[in-house]
Amino acid sequence: MSEYIISGGRPLVGQVTVDGAKNSVLPILCACLLCDDGQVTLTNCPHITDVQYTLEILKLFGCETSFEDGQIHVDAQNVSFREIPCDLVSRMRSAALFLGAAIGRFCMAAQCRPGGCELGSRPIDLHLSSFVKMGLSVSDTGNVVECSGCAHGTDIFLRYPSVGTTENIMLAACRGRGIVTVTNAAREPEIEDLQNFINAMGGKICGAGSGIIIIEGVEKLHGVNYNIIGDRIEAATYLAAAIATDGEITVKGVCPSHLMAVTDLIVNSGGSVCRKNDSITVSRAGQFILSPGRIETSPYPGFPTDAQSIIMAMLLRAAGTTQIHEGVFDDRLRVSSEFIKMGADITVSGRTAYVHGTERLYGARVFAGDLRSGAALVIAALSAQGESVVKNISHIERGYNGFDKKLKSLGAEIIKLKD
Ligand code: EPZ
């Protein structure tokens, strides 16, 4: 297993440009399967393992693909229906979106339940019940899910603004027969990016970002060139690292309005924030990190669950006690035990972690359990005294391209050891 060796205690200073958003490029790649009249070119794509996995599945359907220097080409003009084997689907949660894309293209879909980060239960009941509402027949044997039929017009209310469910409905309905309205839809910026991509191919979707999305099915979708939005969670990672190490970092390539909850929290923690049109600069200017009190993760535009462990790492040495309540997933506080190995003082009760700020952290041998908590452990190691080893970094590489190189460019002492 690959690992990072990190010598902490140095401030990170400089400028870094984030890649295209993982949680935008993955649904958009699934949507490429719907393009039957021309080629798609995507730019600003991150070189991460989840993108490689997704390209493998597109090739299974018969797509021709290439990926070089951040540019992906997909030709889905000569594709045919396939059941996606379990080994391909089990590696990542976003593989569930091939259900909607296959329904949109073939009026049928078959694949195992998706895998992905261990964050607690991750059912797909909302996805499947939405397909049934659109008139599809769905059989769910517990391991393999099969759907058949073409999506027809209906009104769907989501009891929870699920990101993946919203995206699967958009993918299934954009080539369907009729108008589908989704109320209480997810409002994340990546949903808007998916809407804009499908519309650029000739689709008819409106309302993304507002909570009510209307999708009118069209006959065909044509080729397009499309640029992926910047990754707001990758940006949050570097901003938190600046505060945790008492440095100063400018993050470029991201829309500041996409991470207002994070930058607002940084200000409340004693940091200073300067926003420009496509960059954010943060520093602590030697001030102590202050506890911002209580943080609750919630659907966008609330505080993002994906930044929860990252901000916890930033606050491990904050003066006071911070309550961090995980309001989205039922088991996303496991990283606390790894932080404690570094000298952090954290107690967890249910879905709330109580982080009591400590004077300093110490280097330790810690294990990444998922993508975001792995990045959080790196932040903690950078702000600790001494040397840390972060194991299982393959989790981190699912969502961060060149993480060690970017941190090194900011002054971090970090070495990647391959297994
Ligand atoms: C997406 O996951 C993201 N993944 C996650 O990012 C992110 O944490 C999450 O949205 C929330 O923002 C991708 O975009 C690939 P949900 P998703 O459906 O779609 C429950 C990362 O690190 N739920 O909004 O799986 C579910 O159990 C990853 O980049 C149901 O109950 O998130 C969870 O508690 C981690 N039934 C809550 O909703 C369903 O049918 C949020 O899930 C679907 C979801």
Image (tube, helix red, strand yellow):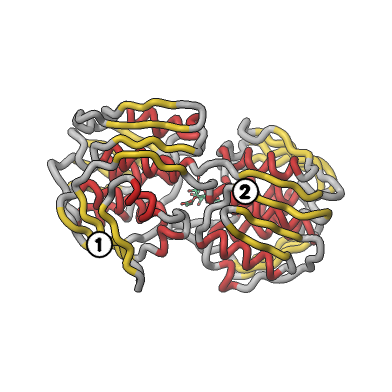
How packed is label 2: few (under 14 Cα within 10 Å), some, or many (20 or more)? some
Could one spot residue 263 in this view of the protein? yes
Q: Residue furthest left?
A: 359
Q: Residue at x 30, y 43 (%)?
A: 312
Along the line of sight, which residue is nearer the eye, 308 or 17?
17
Residue annotated with mark 1? 389
Image coordinates for residue 114, horizontal then vertical, percent: 56, 63
Q: Residue furthest right?
A: 219
Under tag 2, what secondary structure?
Answer: strand
Q: Is residue 11 above or below residue 96?
A: above
Q: Residue at x 13, y 41 (%)?
A: 359
Q: Is residue 352 above or below residue 120?
A: above
Under tag 1, what secondary structure?
Answer: strand
Q: Residue at x 62, y 53 (%)?
A: 71
Q: Quadrant of the C terminus?
A: bottom left
Q: Which mark is residue 89?
A: none
Residue 100 falls left or right of residue 383: right
Image coordinates for residue 122, horizontal then vertical, percent: 50, 56
Q: Amino acid at mark 2?
A: Thr
Q: Residue at x 32, y 67 (%)?
A: 417
Image coordinates for residue 320, horizontal then vertical, percent: 19, 33
Question: Which picture quadrant has residue 314?
Answer: top left
Q: Amino acid at mark 1?
A: Val
Q: Quadrant of the N terminus?
A: bottom left
How packed is label 1: few (under 14 Cα within 10 Å), some, or many (20 or more)? many
Q: Is residue 109 above or below residue 203?
A: below
Residue annotated with mark 2? 43
